[in-house]
Image (cartoon, rainbow, N blue to C red):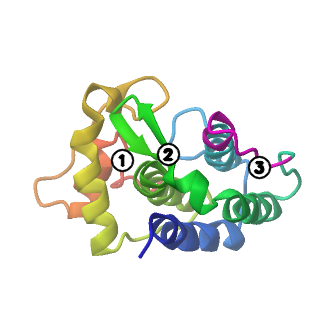
Amino acid sequence: MTPLDDFLTHAGPFSDVVAAGGDWSAPSPCAGWSARDVLDHVVDTEREFFERHEAGLGPRPDGEPATVWATHLDAVRAAATPELLAREYDSVFGRTTVAATLASFYGFDLVVHRWDLARGLGGDTTFTEPELDLIEAALPGFGEHLYADGVCAAAVPVPEDASRQVRLLGTMGRDATSTG
């Protein structure tokens, strides 16, 4: 499986949550953000990443959330050429490639924000074991950046007998034990 395939694997369940819809103005688990704000954050940060690597995705889509996401994802697929994906650059985490960042960082982002969206839209989502492995492996790599402004809130306490998903969400400042 290629790094683009990894990213698209995570985009599938995220797309399902977006397509299911709900009240996009409802608050999400991300303090101060609505469900729509979470979607806009995902779209905008991915667009900024591609633009930094001189691979613009065209005009930012607007309209209904499902249309925005589907149009954006189509643009990502079209822009993710083998040449772009192989491009090396220096990131805050060290030397890497566009492909590796797309798969690891932005794939991670899609998994975590899928939960934020599902909760904000009035539903829930359960991570697969590979998704839990991805999150668990990624968190230490963030180091001090994990709790930087705009990344994750401070960790929240979780019950001692909490599931792996609840524990990992708690590490990322998300209260998965709350229903509201």
Q: Position of residue 5 (x, y in %)?
A: 50, 72
Q: Earlier in the sequence, mark 1 or mark 3?
A: 3
Do the residues under discs 1 and 2 have CB atoms within 8 angstroms? yes
Do the residues under discs 1 and 3 have CB atoms within 8 angstroms? no
Do the residues under discs 3 and 2 have CB atoms within 8 angstroms? no
Q: Is residue 101 magenta?
A: no
Residue at position x 62%, y 46% in the image? 46
Q: Circle 1 sits in a helix, a strand or a loop, which is it?
A: loop
Which residue is denoted by mark 3 in the rendering?
57
Identify the image quadrant of residue 146: top left
Given residues 113 and 5, the one toward you in this image is 5
- Disc 3 marks a residue whose amino acid type is Leu
Q: Earlier in the sequence, mark 1 or mark 2?
A: 2
Residue 126 visible? The answer is: yes
Q: Which residues are magenta?
A: 49-58
- Disc 1 marks a residue whose amino acid type is Asp
Q: Earlier in the sequence, mark 3 or mark 2?
A: 2
